Image (cartoon, helix red, strand yellow):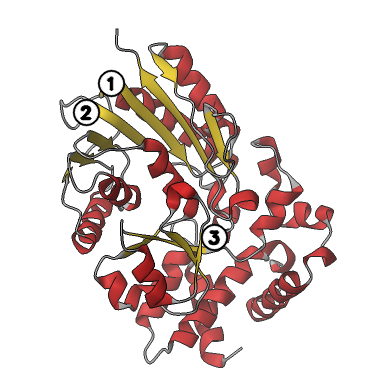
Amino acid sequence: MQTKTFSLARAAIARASRELPADTALRETLRGAKGLTPEDSRGTSEAVFAYYRWHGWVHDLDPEAAILRALELAEKFRIAPQTFSDAELSERAIPDWVTQEMDVTTAWVRSLQSVPRLWLRARKGRGSSIREALWDCEPAGIEALSETYCYTGSRDLFRIPEFQAGDFELQDLNSQIVGHICGAAPGEKWWDACAGEGGKLLHLSDLMQNKGLIIASDRAAWRLRRLKQRAARAGAFNYRIAAWDGGKKLPVKTLFDGVLVDAPCSGIGTWQRNPHARWTTTASDVAELAGIQRKILSHAAAAVKPGGRLVYSVCTLARAETVETCDDFRERYPNFEPLPVQNPFQSGSTPVSKLWLLPQESGGNGMFIAAWKKATA
């Protein structure tokens, strides 16, 4: 490992905390460095994420030794994952409290220790040209996502002309499934109630062919500013911003054909891609966020028109944030009937009202999705 990348990795790790996630600390550290090559940035990123992915093995070592040992373990796991026992991985790869919040399987834990795949979504009609331009693209192999690819190359995709022109977005595979399940059609009105920086909104806009209207809300103004920048680059213009704090007072008086509640969550489903969060998230976070999710979901439901759809998604696998939140909603709002959805990874399977997308099965983030249809009378 080069001295420069090692030094940068140490600096990023030293800055990271619960308040400053490792990926943000990494970006800021790299942004402040001079004369970096793409190899320097890539090497630094690999070191930082390996450190947190293998934190349970190296946390008691000094920083220098910990980074080196983490990289060794990462390479060993890549070449011969069977040399790590299920018991060892279950004991060291995740914090103890997780087993009380979800059903932990060895397959899931093993998936956390591998390097995540990088997924991209081409804008409608541009998949073939993007694949030709990037070369190292493998189709997702899902009929509903025919222009979704796994990128296996080493180029910095944020810097290439096709990205700057808005021809594709970097978006996790299972996040794209959420947009597919929404089924937003041209001319409809949708509300993306927790839009964040706009990843799913851009997908909805593409599905709607830029026709109709999407209201984009979020609690954080800085996320909505970022959404505007991304939408401008992607050429999405069928949306309006409306600030909303998740309370009873809705941002607009419109009734919508569909409302997407991609709620704030503990992010357990992203722990493969974001290993630092394993060691900063707590069981108390899960309980607190479950309460927030229930309030947001119940308030957003008021904006669904009769016959309209309500879609709930979270990138977590904790029971309190998934099935328990949905069961609570169903009990309190009997006028919303569960809307069965098809698992796109299992063609011909029976539609389900609660869909789990697991990283060990799909290659994307862990995701939970549920949908309802509001009664017409």
Q: Indicate left or right for 108 with 243 as reference.
A: right
Q: Position of residue 13 (x, y in %)?
A: 53, 71
Q: Which mark is residue 189?
A: none
Mark 3–mark 2 contact, CB under 8 Å? no
The amino acid on which the numbered mark 1 sits, given as a three-letter code, is: Ala
The amino acid on which the numbered mark 3 sits, given as a three-letter code, is: Arg
Q: Nearer the viewer, residue 245 or 263?
A: 263
Q: Indicate left or right for 35 with 76 as reference.
A: left
Q: Nearer the viewer, residue 364 or 346?
A: 346
Q: Position of residue 111 (x, y in %)?
A: 67, 56
Q: Nearer the viewer, mark 1 or mark 2?
A: 1
Mark 2 lies on residue: 250
Please report the residue visible at 44 percent of the width from the left and 80 percent of the height from the top: 155
Mark 1 lies on residue: 302
Label located before the other in sequence (1 or 3) = 3
Quick check: 151 above or below 344? Answer: below
Quick check: 143 above or below 186? Answer: below
- Which of the 4 image quarters holds residue 3? bottom right
Question: What's the distance in space between the residues labelled 1 and 2, CA to CA?
Answer: 9 Å
Q: Position of residue 292 (x, y in %)?
A: 41, 32
Badge 3: how crowded within 10 Å, few (<14), some, or many (20+)?
many
Label 3 SS: loop
Badge 1: how crowded within 10 Å, few (<14), some, or many (20+)?
some
The amino acid on which the numbered mark 2 sits, given as a three-letter code, is: Leu
Label located before the other in sequence (1 or 2) = 2
- Which of the 4 image quarters holds residue 81? bottom right
Question: What's the distance in space between the residues labelled 1 and 3, CA to CA?
Answer: 34 Å
Badge 2: how crowded within 10 Å, few (<14), some, or many (20+)?
some
Mark 3 lies on residue: 273
Which quarter of the rendering shows the N terminus?
bottom right
Mark 1–mark 3 contact, CB under 8 Å? no
* Residue 357 can be seen in this image: yes
